[in-house]
Image (cartoon, grey):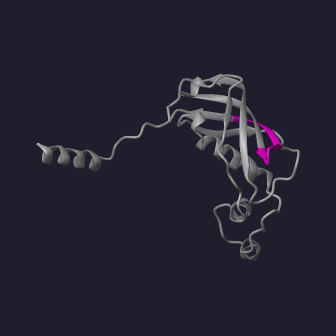
Amino acid sequence: MTLRSPLSFGVGEVLFSSEFRITPHDVAAWERATILGGRDDRPSFRPRFERPPVAGSPVPEGLILARALDAIERSSGLGGCKIEQTSSGKLRALARVGIGESLTSVATVRHRSERPESCFLTLVLEIRGDGRKLAEVEVGVEVRAPTPQRPHPRDWQSSWAILNQAA
């Protein structure tokens, strides 16, 4: 994977994700976090969360958007850059997105604005499944530069020990 700068994304560029699925446990965790947040002081809601929805059930719109953006971020098209959602429009569902369905997302850069260390993009995000477009939304994201990975000191020590043994 080649590293990219946040400023390297151009208007009209298309970003593709790999295949992803939304599981029943993803939906249960999403609903729990939405209702309870970081607190677990509402015991009356617990029985509802202990029974996750079954495959084929509809997926909440917020979860669809979150997973689609996550899939775009994990793809090699971002070159290690991190994205953070700043705004989103209304998700326009063309067909129902079901739990367990094989999905992909395609994002097209519609607008770009720059700052020294980051870039703001407006993306048209399409969620696709079974070769057809299931949903579409316009979303604003901030793109940040990839953080360089520094080797752990132990890695340097083990490499140094190997070199000394060879000598």
Residue 101, image quadrant: bottom right
Magenta highlight on residue 151: no
Residue 115 appears at what percent x and percent y? 59, 24
Q: Residue at x 23, y 45 (%)?
A: 159
Q: Nearer the viewer, residue 92 or 97?
A: 97
Q: Residue at x 62, y 25 (%)?
A: 9
Secondary structure predominantly adopted by residues drawn in magenta = strand
Magenta highlight on residue 135: yes
Left or right placement of residue 4 versus residue 133 in this view: left
Count of marks, rendered view: 0
Vertical placement of residue 51 versus 152, above or below: below
In the image, the segment drawn in magenta is: 128-140
Vertical placement of residue 97 versus 35, above or below: above
Q: Residue furthest left?
A: 167
Q: Nearer the viewer, residue 42 or 108?
A: 108
Q: Residue at x 41, y 40 (%)?
A: 149
Residue 90 appears at what percent x and percent y? 84, 42
Left or right placement of residue 111 versus residue 90 in this view: left
Residue 156 appears at what percent x and percent y? 26, 44
Q: Residue furthest front?
A: 131
- Name the quadrant of the C terminus: top left
Residue 18 appears at what percent x and percent y? 65, 45
Q: Nearer the viewer, residue 9 or 45?
A: 9
Residue 141, image quadrant: top right
